[in-house]
Image (spheres, rainbow, N blue to C red):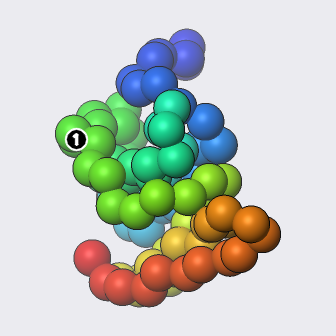
């Protein structure tokens, strides 16, 4: 299994729930992006910008997800939802 480039950016994080994979990362600006994919060969969908910030992290439990990231000046933010 070899590595394959799928985007450009910083601080990627992934979470897996069943056959769904969610990846979050910081773009070249302070914009944060996510991608959805399918398990196995991971066929990524198009990236979607969802917030500004840095160093995103994501966790999934069943249909629930929580994302946390840094804002400016040391602030921390969280987003919660379902997919």
- Residue sitting at 46 percent across and 58 percent down? 52
- Residue sitting at 41 percent across and 26 percent down? 7
Residue that numbered label 1 is attached to: 45
Q: Is residue 60 visible?
A: yes
The relative height of residue 14 versus residue 79 in the rendered view (above or below) is above
Q: Is residue 41 left or right of residue 57?
A: left
Q: Is residue 21 visible?
A: no
Residue 72 on image: x %, y %:
66, 63
The relative height of residue 1 versus residue 65 in the rendered view (above or below) is above
Q: Residue 17 sits in which quadrant?
A: bottom left
Pick out the residue farthest to the front. Answer: 73
Pick out the residue farthest to the left. Answer: 46
Asked whether 19 or 43 is in front, the reply is 43
Q: Quadrant of the image for the C terminus?
A: bottom left
Asked whether 49 or 67 is in front, the reply is 49
Residue 9 on image: x %, y %:
53, 31
Asked whether 22 or 69 is in front, the reply is 69
Asked whether 58 or 78 is in front, the reply is 78
Pick out the residue farthest to the right. Answer: 74
Q: Quadrant of the image for the N terminus?
A: top right
Mark 1 crowd level (few <14, some 14–19, many ≥20, 10 Å Cα): few
Dot 1 lies on which element? loop
Residue 53 on image: x %, y %:
55, 58
Mark count = 1
Q: Is residue 24 left or right of residue 76?
A: left
- Residue sitting at 28 percent across and 42 percent down? 47
Q: Residue 6 sits in which quadrant?
A: top left
- Residue sitting at 78 percent across and 69 percent down? 74
The relative height of residue 47 versus residue 17 in the rendered view (above or below) is above
């Amino acid at each position: 299994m070899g590595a394959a480039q799928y985007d450009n950016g910083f601080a990627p994080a992934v979470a897996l729930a069943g056959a769904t994979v969610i990846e979050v990362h910081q773009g070249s600006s302070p914009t944060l992006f996510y991608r959805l994919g399918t398990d196995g060969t991971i066929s990524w969908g198009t990236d979607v910008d969802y917030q500004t910030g840095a160093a995103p992290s994501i966790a999934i439990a069943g249909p629930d997800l929580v994302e946390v990231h840094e804002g400016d000046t040391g602030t921390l933010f969280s987003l919660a939802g379902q997919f």
